[in-house]
């Protein structure tokens, strides 16, 4: 069976053969960047389509049906529409910040994909602090949101941006603490090693209660970090019209829209890498035949399946839950999630020290 | 109290006022100076407890304005109408009357509306503004013989 | 316990700023503007600014005959147009001494209660949507649509029905009206528990509603609030019970009064009212009397000189029509005491000190219809 890693290796080999070493590295990096970018864009298109269909079926509707079979080309039509629209800058806006903000937000969220391990040996940059890098990078996005809110010179945008700031910074904590619970058990920050450590079982099964709690909390915190309902206070359509991107139009708005979905993909990748075994297939101990069948599914599809499962969870939340109020949101984080996460971390550490996990 | 009892009570309590009838409710016409006193008494007296102002409006009777208060009691559920006759000075001078806001908060919006559409000012109103038409609108449309402005001119 | 250093007062002195919520805003449900003064998220002051769709209905009636005025009333509260028509028709009937046949009365009540159901359906959808849950909106509209179909078939219009006239109703109901309504009732009885299962038990929804937007009984009385809003504050004010009209006195139904005073109670009161409406329709649907659907009235009605007042219970509260006649064929003055205009007064006591999110949630439970405020 051809593995994804072999193809990557083969391309790399070919590049080093035909080009001098320096140019080969550059070309390899560029190719990897393009590959990840196109992968993410395809995923976003699937996500947007999926979001619409999930929403529609939850709301007794059919969703987009006109463009293409089952409305499958609707997203493409929307992208064309966004590209053709004028990217309008309000007169009294801070023009530089206004234009830079969406670009910054998008760049930051794309940067977080660098250390992701897509399959065995397929990774753009296997850094030894991969998880730390992702957590650090993903919290930079809030600066772009604050910039957008401030530069728009719109009060709704400003309120939305301040909400986003308060919310994302708060929920970073419990997200990081949940991640730490798993890090404590594995003892590594490298994405690749994290996945390798789950060859004999996913952490959500191996890690007992602390891992389950950490997973649940991570999904909650990740939903909040992505500004998705029920934590979509930064956008809060009914309260702030559209929050921090009220004044944006055309592709500038498109970038925020894109970022929302890329962020979802990133946090889902982290969640599946840490808790659901990344690209490791699902194995049941002792069922050899079953395990071999599972092994035949390419590892890349395992990762994507898990990612889309978590994305589906987040969509499910969005279309069933009402929105929290800002003080309730912060109360939930500071009074419940963070203290419990801290206790959970201690339990996880205890489990590790005593060797209670498998 | 039913209608007859209420009328008898009103006649007894407010000797200076005129007691009458509308089709539905007993009617009391009071002088402009006594308005607050009468409304206060109606609201606080244990026999009437008229604490709910469910309609306040004005009627332009050519020579005079009638300010009409519809009152009811949430305790006894008897209704009555209270009227004040107001002299109508030539524009731009506006007639003046005491606001009942201090007794019945519901009057705030009704009186704003009357001020806007009839041009009657209310003393002691917390926030008297042209609520519906806006400050620039010429004249008071619900007055009889109101001349419509040239819309093109108004909107300029 | 007092904090040792009061950070809020000394260190973090913040500026207030004014935000106009509306007239174009997703959750004011029309062109209403709240001029809010905010300190961060907290509302310091709120002034409702209205008049964006003022059409001068009261002035227009002075140039129209009584029958023509009916058509304007449909345009006030477009979600209670039957009740608006009815109020205007009743006051003219009262003034001119017109008898209404029993069949017409029954049809009026049926239509009004269906309208109340449809209106509360729409409120339920928009209320939950204002809190942030979008899905219930579609469920509400699915069920409301069946009622609107009945209206469309029987009256020719979905919103501005102009169906109830002095002397009866515009035209007789269609033969399949009764089975259709029965079908609607059967569906609604299944769907109401579904609504409750979807939304009522939701923890976040309860958190957003309970203890929020407190309107005490004293405030409600003083502000002249009526309808479900007042009934949720413990005031019994259902006109159908207190001053029955069109034969409501013969029907068995409960006035829903609760004294929770908060958004959650207002929400429950409306849901309960829907059940009562279903109960009313069930009593009548098999017992529509035979006979005329309208008495013949003169082409031009003239009311004797005098003042008349008629109130009806719309889906949002008490609609009063104050009708001054000078004996001619046109009203001398017609004042519509619209429920939303009075209910708007709660905006300030309800929201000062609350947060922006609460403003939206608690105003959603007040259920304002803006054309009715402006008239």
Image (spheres, helix red, strand yellow):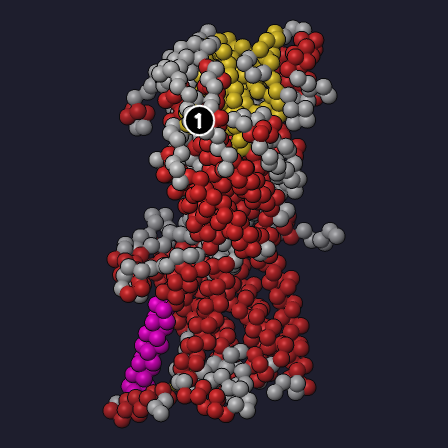
Give x and y (percent) for residue A76: 29, 64
Magenta region, main secondary structure: helix
Q: Is residue A296 above or below residue C317?
A: below
Q: Is residue B24 above or below residue C76?
A: above
- Per the rendered image, the range of residues in magenta is A21-46
Give x and y (percent) for residue A34: 31, 77
SS for callout 1: loop
Q: Is residue A30 above or below residue C84?
A: below
Give x and y (percent) for residue A175: 55, 70
Foreground residue, C130 or B86? Answer: C130
Q: Is residue C316 above or below residue A20?
A: above
Mark 1 Cα-neighbour bin, 10 Å: few <14, some 14–19, many ≥20: few
- Residue C15 falls left or right of residue A292: right
Give x and y (percent) for residue A230: 51, 59
Give the mark count: 1
For residue B80, say whether it is visible.
yes
| Residue name at image x 57 percent, y 32 percent | C251
Q: Chain of mark 1?
A: C
For residue B131, say whether it is visible.
no
Q: Quadrant of the C terminus of chain A?
A: bottom right
Q: Quadrant of the N terminus of chain A?
A: bottom left
- Residue A284 falls left or right of residue C175: right
Q: Report the residue marked by disc 1.
A: C291
| Residue name at image x 42 percent, y 63 percent | A54
- Residue C80 falls left or right of residue B76: left
* A44 within the magenta span: yes
Foreground residue, C300 or C6? Answer: C300
Foreground residue, A104 or C263? Answer: C263
């Amino acid at each position: 069976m051809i593995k994804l890693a072999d193809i990557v290796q083969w391309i790399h080999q070919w590049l080093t053969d035909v080009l001098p070493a320096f140019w080969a590295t550059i070309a390899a990096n560029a190719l990897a960047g393009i590959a990840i970018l196109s992968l993410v864009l395809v995923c976003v298109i699937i996500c947007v389509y999926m979001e619409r269909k999930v929403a529609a079926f939850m709301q007794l509707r059919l969703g987009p049906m006109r463009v293409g079979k089952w409305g499958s080309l609707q997203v493409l039509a929307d992208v064309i529409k966004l590209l053709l629209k004028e990217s309008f800058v309000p007169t009294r806006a801070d023009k530089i910040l206004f234009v830079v903000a969406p670009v910054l937000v998008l760049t930051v969220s794309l940067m977080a994909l660098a250390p992701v391990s897509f399959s065995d040996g397929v990774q753009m940059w296997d850094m030894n602090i991969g998880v730390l890098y992702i957590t650090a990078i993903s919290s930079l996005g809030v600066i772009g949101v604050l910039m957008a809110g401030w530069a728009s010179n719109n009060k709704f945008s400003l309120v939305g941006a301040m909400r986003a700031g308060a919310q994302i910074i708060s929920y970073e904590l419990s997200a990081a603490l949940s991640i730490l619970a798993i890090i404590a058990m594995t003892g590594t920050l490298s994405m690749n090693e994290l996945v390798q450590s789950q060859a004999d079982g996913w952490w959500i099964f191996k890690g007992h209660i602390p891992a389950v709690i950490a997973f649940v909390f991570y999904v909650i915190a990740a939903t909040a970090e992505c500004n998705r309902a029920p934590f979509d206070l930064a956008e809060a359509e009914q309260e702030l019209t559209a929050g921090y991107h009220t004044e944006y139009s055309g592709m500038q708005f498109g970038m925020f829209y894109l970022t929302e979905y890329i962020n979802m993909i990133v946090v889902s990748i982290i969640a599946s890498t840490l808790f659901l075994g990344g690209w490791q297939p699902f194995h049941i101990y002792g069922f050899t035949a079953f395990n071999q069948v599972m092994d035949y599914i390419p590892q890349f599809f395992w990762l994507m399946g898990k990612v889309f499962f978590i994305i589906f969870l987040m969509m499910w939340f969005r279309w069933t839950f009402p929105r929290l109020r800002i003080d309730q949101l912060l109360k939930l984080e500071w009074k419940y999630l963070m203290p419990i996460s801290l206790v959970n971390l201690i339990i996880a550490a205890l489990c590790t020290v005593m060797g209670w996990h498998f | 109290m039913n209608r007859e009892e209420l009328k008898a009570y009103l006649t007894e309590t407010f000797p200076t006022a005129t007691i009458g009838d509308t089709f539905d409710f007993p009617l009391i016409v009071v002088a402009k100076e006594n308005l607050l006193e009468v409304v206060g008494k109606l609201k606080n007296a244990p026999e009437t407890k008229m604490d709910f102002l469910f309609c306040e409006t004005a009627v332009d009777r050519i020579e005079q304005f009638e300010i009409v208060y519809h009152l009811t009691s949430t305790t006894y559920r008897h209704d009555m109408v209270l009227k004040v006759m107001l002299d109508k000075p030539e524009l731009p001078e506006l007639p003046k009357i005491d606001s009942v806001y201090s007794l019945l908060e519901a009057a705030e919006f009704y009186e704003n509306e009357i001020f806007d559409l009839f041009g009657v000012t209310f003393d002691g109103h917390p926030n008297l503004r042209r609520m519906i038409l806006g400050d620039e609108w010429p004249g008071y449309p619900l007055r009889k013989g109101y001349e419509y402005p040239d819309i093109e001119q108004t909107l300029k | 316990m007092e904090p040792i250093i009061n950070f809020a007062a000394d260190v973090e002195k913040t500026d207030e700023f004014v935000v106009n919520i509306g007239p174009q805003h997703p959750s004011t449900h029309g062109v209403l503007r709240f001029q809010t003064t905010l300190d961060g998220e907290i509302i310091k002051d709120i002034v409702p600014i209205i008049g964006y769709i003022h059409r001068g209905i009261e002035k227009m009636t002075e140039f129209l005959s009584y029958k023509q005025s009916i058509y304007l009333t449909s345009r006030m509260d477009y979600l209670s147009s039957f009740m608006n028509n009815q109020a205007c028709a009743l006051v003219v009937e009262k003034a001119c001494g017109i008898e209404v046949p029993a069949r017409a009365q029954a049809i009026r009540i049926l239509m009004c209660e269906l309208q109340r159901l449809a209106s509360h359906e729409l409120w339920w959808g928009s209320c939950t949507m204002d809190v942030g849950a979008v899905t219930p909106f579609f469920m509400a509209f699915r069920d409301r649509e069946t009622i609107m179909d009945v209206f469309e078939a029987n009256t020719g219009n979905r919103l501005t029905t102009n169906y109830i006239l002095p002397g009866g109703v515009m035209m007789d109901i269609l033969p399949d009206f009764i089975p259709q309504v029965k079908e609607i009732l059967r569906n609604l009885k299944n769907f109401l528990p579904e609504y409750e299962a979807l939304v009522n038990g939701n923890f976040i929804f309860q958190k957003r509603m309970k203890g929020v937007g407190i309107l005490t009984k004293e405030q409600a009385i003083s502000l002249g609030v009526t309808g479900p809003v007042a009934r949720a504050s413990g005031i019994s004010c259902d006109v159908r019970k207190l001053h029955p009209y069109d034969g409501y006195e013969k029907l068995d139904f409960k006035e829903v009064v609760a004294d929770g005073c908060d958004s959650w109670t207002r929400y429950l009161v409306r849901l309960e009212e829907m059940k009562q409406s279903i109960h009313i329709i069930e009593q009548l649907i098999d017992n529509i009397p035979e006979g005329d659907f309208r008495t013949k009235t003169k082409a031009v009605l003239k009311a004797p000189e005098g003042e008349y007042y008629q109130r009806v219970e719309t889906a949002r509260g008490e609609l009063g029509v104050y009708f001054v006649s000078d004996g001619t064929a046109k009203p001398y003055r017609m004042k519509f005491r619209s429920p939303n205009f009075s209910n708007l007064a709660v905006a300030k006591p309800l929201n000062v000190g609350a947060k922006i999110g609460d403003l939206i949630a608690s105003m959603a439970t007040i259920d304002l219809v803006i054309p009715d405020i402006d008239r």
